[in-house]
Image (cartoon, grey):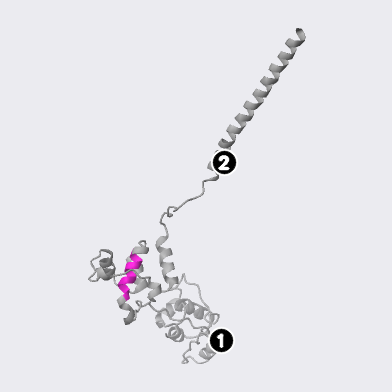
Amino acid sequence: MANTLLMPKAAAVWLVDNTALSFEQIAQFCKLHPLEVGAIADGESAQGIKGLDPVITGQLSRDEIAKGEADPSYKLKLQEPKVRVPESKRRAPRYTPLSKRQDRPNAILWLVKNHPELKDAQISRLVGTTKSTIEQIRNRTHWNSNNLVPMDPVTLGLCSQIDLDLEVQRASKGLPPAAPAGDTLLPASMTESLEVGAEQPEKEEEELDANAVFAKLSSLKSTSQDDDEE
């Protein structure tokens, strides 16, 4: 990747305002036309652009500017960047070794059965297949459907567990939470109400016992009074 000047028009604005370089030198350095540099100097172009010092960005040295100012025929040289930014590469389709391609339909069937939330594009990224093949396996119209056996693509080495988990996580976003399976604990409010309800009969029994005791005491007292009167 060739080294290019950052924000060439902004650099040209700064060089016009802060150096004695010729329009041709600035145009050559910033990859602009000399007439455009002249328009910048006259205020007819780049009026809303703030100048950018190429010395601060590390793309031009003070010595290089001094050489250019001393010799109008001198061509400014762009400095090599101190940090290389790796060139972005377009991600190529996942390559599947020939020895594992026969297992790919089994892996697709496993993904379709165990992760129905995955989209065709996600399955294609994971195992390196086409949407038509996925559709055939979904609909059981694949030429080898009767012999397919669901097999984990991670175990087959067609993708990593990290890639699979990432795609599943992406596909699960926005989906309603799964219903709980098996026995679950009752809410605290229900258990409290049940406990209160369970205690009530005991309280009623206690109240009944107390009433019976008082009634018995009253009857004994009245009996003793009758004996005294006799």
The correct choice, above or below, for 185 with respect to 107 in the image is above
Label 1 vs 2, first from the N-terminus: 1
Q: Amino acid under label 1?
A: Arg
Q: Residue at x 66, y 26 (%)?
A: 210
Distance from the alpha carbon under mark 1 to that under mark 2: 81 Å
- Is residue 15 rendered to the left or right of residue 157? right
Q: Nearer the viewer, residue 169 or 78?
A: 169
Disc 1 or disc 2, which is closer to the eye?
2
The correct choice, above or below, for 197 with respect to 16 in the image is above
Kindly indicate the quadrant of the structure image that contains residue 112. bottom left
Q: Amino acid under label 2?
A: Glu
- Residue 164 rendering spot, x and y as whole percentages: 41, 69
Examine the structure image and report whether residue 108 is included in the region drawn in magenta: yes
Q: Residue furthest top?
A: 230
**Residue wearing tag 2:** 192
- Is residue 176 rendered to the left or right of residue 204? left
Q: Residue at x 73, y 16 (%)?
A: 221
Q: Nearer the viewer, residue 230 or 27?
A: 230
Kindly indicate the quadrant of the structure image that contains residue 152. bottom left
The correct choice, above or below, for 131 with respect to 72 in the image is above
Q: Residue at x 40, y 74 (%)?
A: 155
Q: Nearer the viewer, residue 189 or 23?
A: 189
- Residue 156 rendering spot, x and y as whole percentages: 38, 75
Magenta stretch prevailing secondary structure: helix
- Residue 207 rendering spot, x and y as whole percentages: 63, 27
**Residue wearing tag 1:** 62
- Residue 66 rendering spot, x and y as whole percentages: 55, 89
Helix, strand or loop under label 2 = helix
- What stretch of residues is rendered in magenta? 103-112
